[in-house]
Image (tube, rainbow, N blue to C red):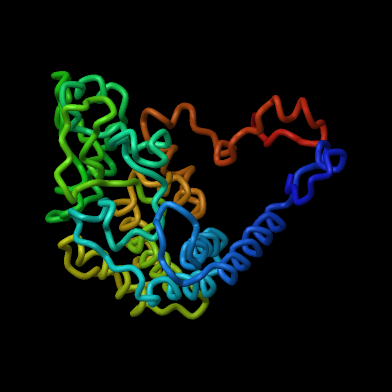
Amino acid sequence: PLILTTDVEENKLKGRTTKAEIYNQIETDLKKAITLLPPTIGARYYINNKYIPEAILANVYLTQGKWSEAETSATNVIESGKFQLANVADVFLQNSPETIMATGYTYYTDEKILKSAYPGAFLILPSGALKVYLENMGPSLSESLLNSFESGDMRKANWTIASNAGGYSNPLNRVFSYKYKYETMFDPAVVIPVGREEDQKFMRLAELYLIRAEARASKTTPDLIGAASDLNIIRNRAGLTNTTAKTKTDLIEAIIKERRVELFFESFTRWFDLIRTNKADAVYGAIPYKAANWKPHMKLFPIPVAEINYNPNLKQNPGY
């Protein structure tokens, strides 16, 4: 339900709101935030400038297939001059000029604000004496993802790490995300070099280039040159040559692939890409260890039974 009032009696038995109404409200709220917030960039951990809701709005438009609107919002952020792409090795630093918004710190010292809100990045490798422990907890990269990196991609060299401290039988496949390199919560002996402090990114400039690239390639009158230019900016930053994709279909496929190797392990991006491009059934159905259990209805999560018990006007999603 979309709840916009504080009337308990009205709200407690309110039924499901349509997807269109939800997206309309999201757009309305973000547009209002853009008008109310200043262009001045403050601390990156709060929604305190107009470019943060503008970047989110670009993503909302992309999700709905509103290509022209997505292009416009992404362009507003890119051409603001407030953010710049960083070197691959510096993207996840606290002082990265690429950061539009970060969601908190990896865990450093007790005086850090938001210290208890350490992100999913806290399961990183290496981590001193606890490597084996973390290898058993943290997910390794899939073979499919590893094979998606092209030869010479600096992101694979800088953002992944092979680790097999436990001596497992498949060491070549035990490759972990290495976007965040220092972990002090589990191992206080780890020393973070001065100037290499990190935080987890909620949204960064590279994603806006890829949003605009896809929007330009997908709109009714495609701008394939502009889309390729945006894609190449991200590829060149990673040490890769320009894309060879020429047609609309090939270019969109290349952009989705680029999103995978650029944004892996960030905000469930791959999941949402597969859902919005209608590729989830084909991809998950082809993964050996998922195929037996994957069903098309799983593209929607189940509504918690407790919520349905509270409110009989809520109906469970199909298949559950």
Asked whether 258 or 266 is in front, the reply is: 266
Q: Is residue 42 above or below residue 69?
A: above
* The residue positioned farthest toward the front in the image shown: 111
- Horizontal side of 78 relative to 144 (left or right) equals right
Q: Quadrant of residue 84?
A: bottom left
Q: Quadrant of residue 77?
A: bottom left
Give the x, y percent position of residue 20.
Answer: 69, 58
Give the x, y percent position of residue 274.
Answer: 45, 49
- Horizontal side of 235 relative to 293 (left or right) equals left
Give the x, y percent position of residue 111.
Answer: 34, 37
Asked whether 255 or 245 is in front, the reply is: 255
Q: Residue at x 50, y 60 (%)?
A: 56
Quadrant that contains the N terminus = top right
- Horizontal side of 108 relative to 56 (left or right) equals left
Quadrant that contains the C terminus = top right
Q: Is residue 261 visible?
A: yes
Q: Residue at x 62, y 63 (%)?
A: 27
* The residue positioned farthest toward the right in the image shown: 9
Asked whether 270 or 133 is in front, the reply is: 133
Asked whether 213 or 170 is in front, the reply is: 213
Q: Is residue 218 visible?
A: no
